[in-house]
Image: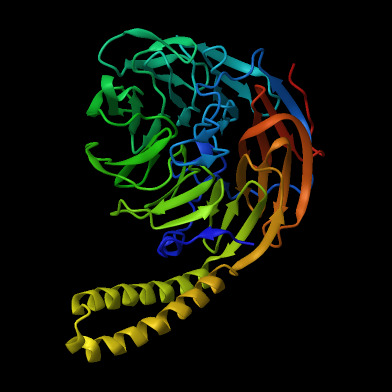
């Protein structure tokens, strides 16, 4: 059953925007700058382990866990909201798997076919977020405060830029790091890379745009009220900056000036549906949505992740995956929105009329209409809650991707695949560790766990070779 927390209705309008279409690479975290987690390449009906790469040491997340409860607001069993570095998130491009390591301060490139190491590049601090790869180059940041650009084939340096104002080191998260660490991804769009440096607002959090080829600065903005941690997102006009446990910041991509801070639940999970931002998971597992041009949260869904396609959206919670028919949902949403506006207008008119006896005749038809609208809105809301196409229970609640017509979910000690036509589970496998990272390219599935393992699953008829 769908469990939407319906605050307002324009979510359906946002979900009308189809997920981006990709080529056969997965060149950035969650596939693209919208973090859509989708690939057009179908997965085979069965998968087998092809190779298994293990780090000497597991990931060392900056933040080990969420507080157990919020005493001020009496909220218990809080959700972890900063999970961006719990696994070595894989990027698959140009025949290699790339990832950064918070355990040994490296970026690695593995052969995508065999899992054998091609190269490794040291930085002077943990590399907590996945790199971005395009046209033979790779860009990433480190807790040492630098952004790096390398050749993707051999790790030869192209340029390196320190983003913060000085090379000052401090203790941070059990390590010695820059006072302005790179705690967001390095995002590439139209020949420009975007990143932030700094997580202490009192020291200034620097938001920068650099020429992707040379590292030359295009613009810089400094914010002093919010941190910056997590994966950046971008549309043609906006740059979206996660702020750790706080709410995301929206900036103009042309010059970086702040447009707004969105309302709703905080967290570092986010995706774009067109120019509408879906983010969370909040304190108890909610995905909020705001449309471009608005700061207010317009809708909320109970869940951890969402995938948006042309005709459907898939909601992923701690206990299930639900497929939603967006066309029907949109029709109901538009009707409910119109009634809601009428309801608000009538309520304002009644307040203006007041309670004086001489206004009784004018108040009566408004009250009657208001009494009609309430039940209609309730009926439509109930219909919206039944717009699901199917519902699939699953314990795999930590990650989700869409490969062709197959949803793949990662969980604690398991991965499971579901047919998008009916939600039927078609494949599963046990793994060691919690699966926080998934990527899929050319019918091959790559899995990353909190134990520092990267696994490759593919058609068992293909020749396999296990990395050592």
Residue at the spot x=34%, y=31% of the render? Answer: 194
Q: 360 and 313: which one is in front?
A: 360
Lateral position of residue 98 relative to residue 160, left or right:
right
In the rendered image, the quadrant that contains the C terminus is top right
- Looking at the picture, the colour scheme in use is rainbow
Placement of 260 over or under 111, stated as above or below: below
Placement of 375 over or under 91, stated as above or below: below
Lateral position of residue 406 relative to residue 72, left or right:
right
Percent position of residue 236, x then y: 32, 47
Taking the image as drawn, is residue 27 in sight? Answer: no
Residue at the spot x=46%, y=11% of the render? Answer: 123
Q: 284 and 189: which one is in front?
A: 284
Lateral position of residue 306 relative to residue 160, left or right:
right
Taking the image as drawn, is residue 274 in sight? Answer: yes
Q: 102 and 456: which one is in front?
A: 102
Residue at the spot x=47%, y=70% of the render? Answer: 330
- Residue 51 occupies which quadrant of the picture? top right
Percent position of residue 110, x then y: 62, 22
Percent position of residue 271, x then y: 46, 46
In the rendered image, the quadrant that contains the N terminus is bottom right
Q: 178 and 236: which one is in front?
A: 178
Placement of 220 over or under 373, stated as above or below: above
Percent position of residue 318, x then y: 64, 46
Residue farthest to the front? 357
């Amino acid at each position: 059953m769908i469990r939407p927390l319906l605050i307002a209705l324009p979510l359906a309008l946002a979900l009308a925007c189809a997920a981006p279409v990709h080529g056969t690479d997965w060149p950035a975290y969650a596939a693209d700058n919208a973090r859509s987690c989708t690939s057009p390449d179908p997965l085979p009906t069965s998968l087998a382990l092809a190779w298994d790469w293990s780090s000497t040491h597991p990931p060392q997340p900056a933040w080990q866990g969420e507080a157990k409860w919020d005493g001020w607001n009496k909220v218990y069993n809080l959700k972890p909201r900063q999970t961006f570095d719990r696994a070595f998130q894989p990027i698959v491009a140009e025949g290699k798997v790339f990832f950064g390591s918070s355990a040994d301060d490296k970026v690695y490139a593995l052969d995508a076919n065999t899992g054998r190491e091609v190269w490794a590049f040291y930085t002077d601090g943990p590399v907590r977020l996945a790199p971005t790869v395009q046209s033979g180059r790779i860009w990433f940041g480190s807790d040492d405060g630098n952004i790096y650009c390398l050749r993707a084939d051999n790790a030869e340096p192209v340029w390196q830029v320190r983003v913060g104002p000085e090379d000052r080191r401090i203790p941070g998260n059990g390590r010695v790091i820059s006072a302005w660490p790179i705690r967001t991804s390095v995002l590439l769009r139209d020949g420009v890379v975007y990143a932030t440096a700094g997580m202490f607002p009192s020291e200034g959090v620097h938001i920068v745009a650099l020429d992707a080829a040379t590292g030359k600065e295009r613009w810089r903005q400094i914010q002093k009220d919010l941190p910056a941690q997590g994966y950046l997102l971008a549309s043609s006009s906006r740059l979206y900056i996660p702020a750790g446990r706080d709410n995301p910041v929206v900036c103009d991509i042309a010059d970086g000036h702040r447009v707004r801070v969105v309302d709703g639940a905080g967290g570092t999970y986010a995706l774009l549906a067109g120019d509408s931002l879906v983010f969370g998971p909040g304190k108890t597992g909610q995905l909020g949505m705001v449309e471009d041009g608005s700061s207010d949260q317009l809708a909320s869904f109970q869940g951890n992740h969402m995938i948006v396609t042309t005709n459907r959206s898939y909601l992923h919670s701690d206990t299930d995956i639900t497929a939603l028919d967006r066309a029907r949902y949109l029709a109901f949403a538009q009707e409910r929105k119109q009634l809601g506006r009428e309801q608000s207008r009538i309520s304002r008119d009644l307040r203006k009329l007041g309670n004086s006896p001489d206004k009784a005749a004018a108040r009566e038809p408004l009250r009657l209409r208001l009494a009609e609208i309430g039940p209609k809105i309730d009926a439509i809301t109930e219909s919206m809650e039944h717009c699901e196409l199917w519902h699939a229970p699953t314990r795999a609640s930590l990650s989700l991707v869409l490969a062709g017509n197959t949803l793949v979910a990662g969980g604690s000690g398991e991965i499971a695949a579901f047919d998008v036509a009916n939600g039927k589970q078609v494949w599963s496998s046990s793994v060691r560790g919690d699966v926080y990272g998934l990527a899929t390219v050319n019918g091959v599935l790559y899995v990353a766990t909190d134990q520092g393992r990267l696994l490759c699953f593919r058609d068992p008829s293909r020749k396999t070779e296990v990395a050592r």
